[in-house]
Amino acid sequence: MTGAAFFDLDRTLLGGSSGSVFQRTLRDQGLGPDVDIPGLSALNSLFGLVGETRMTMRLAKASSRAAKGWSTDAVAIAAEAAVPELLDLVESFVAIEFARHREAGRPIVMATSSPMQLVEPLARALEVDDVLATKWETTSGADGEVFSGGIDGRFVWARDKWLEVRDWCAAHGVDTRDSWAYSDSYYDAAMLAGVGHPCAVNPDPRLAAVATLQGWPIRSLGKPPGVVTIAGRELQEFLRPLSRPELVPNAKIEIENIEKIPSDGSAIVVANHRSYYDSTVMGMLIAKAGRSARFLGKKEVFDAPVLGQIAAAMGGIRVDRGTGSDEPLALAIEALKAGELVMLMPQGTIPRGPAFFDSELKGRWGTAKLAAASGAKVIPVGLWGTEKVWPRSQKLPSFDVTNPPAIAVNVGDPVELTGEDIDADTRAIMAAISDLLPPEAKVERDPTNEELMATFPPGYSGDPNAEQDRRPGTDT
């Protein structure tokens, strides 16, 4: 057999702690105290922020004693009742990661210190292949089977979790060197070190340090691979308070119909491309909507020192236009299936020369293909005036704070697409964007030489008249 994939539960498969959910459903069955325990809420909050500590795990181990005399049937009912709420906590990229392992023939195993009797229903709902968990010991009571207050076997935590994984692999003919393990906890370092493919997921500070020193991948199963998170939050979330139009001194940015950006769920947000400043303005739009987005950008951005690392850490998707690779499309589809926003410019690059002033926007097929493959709706955005802040002819943006230019951002309704005719859908997308632009954008006119040259990069020496025939998204 090939390797297996072992997943911790809390703060790994789930975005938080299962403990507080189980406490509520157990209480509904008359199990445990019927009043709030002082400090328990604070402990759960602390666990959600920094992960496991020896104190919280001592309490977890002692829970078997607290369960002494509880009916196993009542606990089973509580465990089933917890499943819907726990499924809501499952991180958005878990299904994608599971599918990847299943496609490779690897069994998926949940490995957790939580009681087996509580997590089994969730494991069935997630369709994992096996569960390694702490087993509360049972005994016969006056009215049926009850818990004795002891633990049957290991408390599946720290080194003992690794021993459970090791023994499971030996029993099932699985090579640990071909196996994967995912955890947020420093105390699972033994399990991570024992497999060939460890992954630190939303790691606590100590595990983050160990993973960095060992060269282990660090990620969150709630975000696309490569997105850097701190305490479960990504860089875009930290930057939202600063990504506000009113804080920009060199432009007057007006955003209309922001409510048309979905507050949750997947969507493809598309805009026309007029300036190097477009990505900044679109970032402000997404931030103002309270969302994060995965931006598709040309490889030159990702290859640039510092800027490229930041773009990747924010979940950007690198597009090498010269290769025709399907990888960017596949990554964007994964993000959409996980409920993310994906943002791109269908024109591929800023039009140059006479093409910049064309009243008809021309786009590439990528957006239509992405919409057809993912089923996500396409939200059009019209941008106007960004070229006044940062024309293509300048290496840096203008910084006129005395008379800042106006930038209009207008969000439209989802575009109606066929899902089958890529050409027709591409035209519909570009027409929807065009409809959001001011009337002057639709007027055919001859630009002045100064306006024309502002659309070319510094040092441009090509043929301006050839720009009308240049394929969108290419440099030649």
Image (cartoon, rainbow, N blue to C red):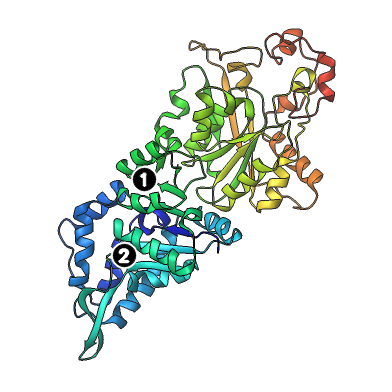
Q: Quadrant of the C terminus?
A: top right
User: Do labels 2 and 1 touch, CB within 8 Å?
Assistant: no
Q: Residue furthest left?
A: 38
Residue 85 in the image: above or below residue 147: above
Q: Amino acid at mark 1?
A: Pro
* Residue 385 lies in quadrant: top right
Mark on residue 114? Answer: 2
* Residue 304 lies in quadrant: top right
**Residue 176 appears at what percent x and percent y?**
46, 57
Q: Which residue is mark 1?
A: 203
Residue 112 seen in this snapshot: yes
Instruction: Left or right? Give the position of 452 relative to 387.
Output: right
Residue occupying the point 71% across, 16% down: 455
Instruction: Left or right? Give the position of 3 relative to 183.
Output: right
Q: Amino acid at mark 2?
A: Ser
Q: Residue furthest bottom?
A: 142
The one nearer the camera, 305 or 385, is 305
Q: Label 1's element?
A: loop
Residue 163 in the image: above or below residue 327: below
Instruction: Left or right? Give the position of 319 relative to 148.
Output: right
- Whichever of callouts 2 and 1 sits on the residue coming sooner in the sequence is 2
Instruction: Left or right? Give the position of 180 relative to 117.
Output: right
Residue occupying the point 72% across, 12% down: 451
**Residue 307 appears at what percent x and percent y?**
52, 24
Q: Label 2's element?
A: strand
